[in-house]
Amino acid sequence: MALLDIDEKILGVAAIADIAFWPIAVDTKLKDVEAMPDKSITLTLYNGAIRNSENEHVAKLLRQKSALVVAFGSCACFGGIPGLANVTNKKDLQDYVYNKTFTSVNPQGTIPQPKWDGPEGELTLPVMYDTVLTLEDVIDVDYFMPGCPPTTDQINGFLDVVTKHLTEGAALPPKGAVIASQKTLCDECGRTKEVTTIDKIVMPYEIKIDPKKCMLEQGIICLGPATRAGCGAKCLEGNQPCRGCFGPTAEVLDQGGSMLSALASIFKTADNETQLSEDEILELMTQIKDPLGTFYAFTMPKSIIKRKVKEKKAVTQ
Amino acid sequence: MSTQQGTSPAAVTATTEGQFEPKIIAFCCNWCSYAGADLAGVSRLQMPTNFLVLRAMCSARVDPEFVLRAFAKGADGVLVLGCHPADCHYIGGNYRTRRRIALLKMLLEQYGLDPDRLHLEWVSASEGVKFQSTIKDFTEKIREMGPNPLKEAEEESARVQGEPHH
């Protein structure tokens, strides 16, 4: 869909390229792609995380048939918001959806099965995975274009590079390049920053947000300091804090850890700091209600600890 | 340094067959806790050898990423040791650390890990005995908790994902 956002430029795409497979816009079937020679597709923009066997199959097929594969959007790059499903697992999810919601009536406990032998023959469904994976987890990826969605500038810029490569033989970016900036979002943000400490966290609706002042300075959690630039700080122009869809910066592995560090550091230290107990500090930090959901909104499957685990032994307090 | 004698990385892995030996990473700040660990060593204080010391210039230099990575790589427990409040060589590094560790514990809990696998302690250069007791107590605590669940989860996830495709 993001690709359609480039408006009339899409005609330029049609001028230089035949569309091989685009389920949302054209009617090509998977078997048509299967029949194509290897590497015959110049460029694949793969969007979405890898959540089931069908996703993985399509990703592997497109890798085989394409010269270049781009992880297109935050889901393909980092797992995206669906990646937050890694706080649970397949069994609990299915159990909730099919048995436990208020409106569920399922006395036989029927849940989707990957195979069913019917009179028409064997019917199959994709196998849902326990863990949401990124595209890079299952295939070799040439470029990464983060963003939820990627911006038209990123798409146009990259399409220009590929067009130049095809028509004039210009060099492509180095493999593994991220089609965005090397800096943090704060670099692109036009808001002014004066103080460096805060004493409390507020939700955006709790205050009248000053459109010129740094969000963090106003006590609103903004992932700018831990997020890669390249979007032009559009959300911030719209008076919304950054939620981190461009993922971690080049020098950082874990966006959440990076934001955690930044946020903990800007909390004001009091004059009576030496008298404060660990419990009081914990209370200060519990102003941040959901660190995992806030700091890893788009990147949990790509984080250092990729999914929730379970302690074997009961927690001893 | 003395406390490190005989504590090669190999020695930190399981020693006795079948018995769980915790692997512990201890980040020590250069100015207080590392000197405290050294004092414990030169004083020949006895303590379990399940830990590896990593020296950082300040406890605030211990990026949350380091801690998460230690757990992801199989550490069963992580200790962060710094200067007492008001004693930080960099004035207020340990205050930042304190906030970060509190937040990190919340995060670890959300990831399903026991937050007590991460522990922050103030150990000064003159507190060799405190270093010893911190190591002893923490090792015991981790021994009771059992292995880091991330190790097992990794194997399990590989198995579940490996279901045959149609």
Image (cartoon, coloured by chain):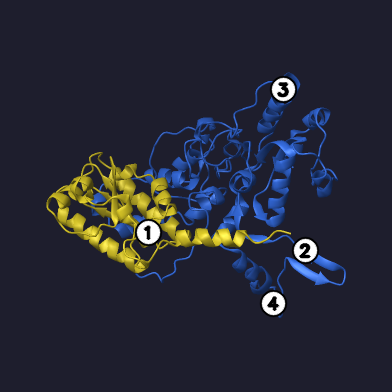
Chain colours: A blue, B yellow
Task: Write down the residue under mark 2.
Answer: A124
Q: Chain of mark 2?
A: A
Check if mark 1 and mark 2 are on a common chain: no
**Mark 2: which amino acid?**
Thr
Check if mark 2 and mark 3 are on a common chain: yes
- Location of the N terminus of chain A (image quadrant): top right
Front residue of A238/A228: it is: A228
**Mark 1: which amino acid?**
Asp
Residue A21 seen from this side: yes
Task: Write down the residue under mark 4.
Answer: A109
**Mark 4: which amino acid?**
Gly
Marks 3 and 1 sit apart, C-alpha to C-alpha, by 52 Å
Disc sitting over residue A164 in the figure: 3
Q: Chain of mark 4?
A: A
Per the image, label 3 sits on a secondary structure element best described as helix
**Mark 3: which amino acid?**
Lys
- Residue A44 is situated, as x and y percent measured from the top left of the image, at 72, 38
Residue A221 seen from this side: no
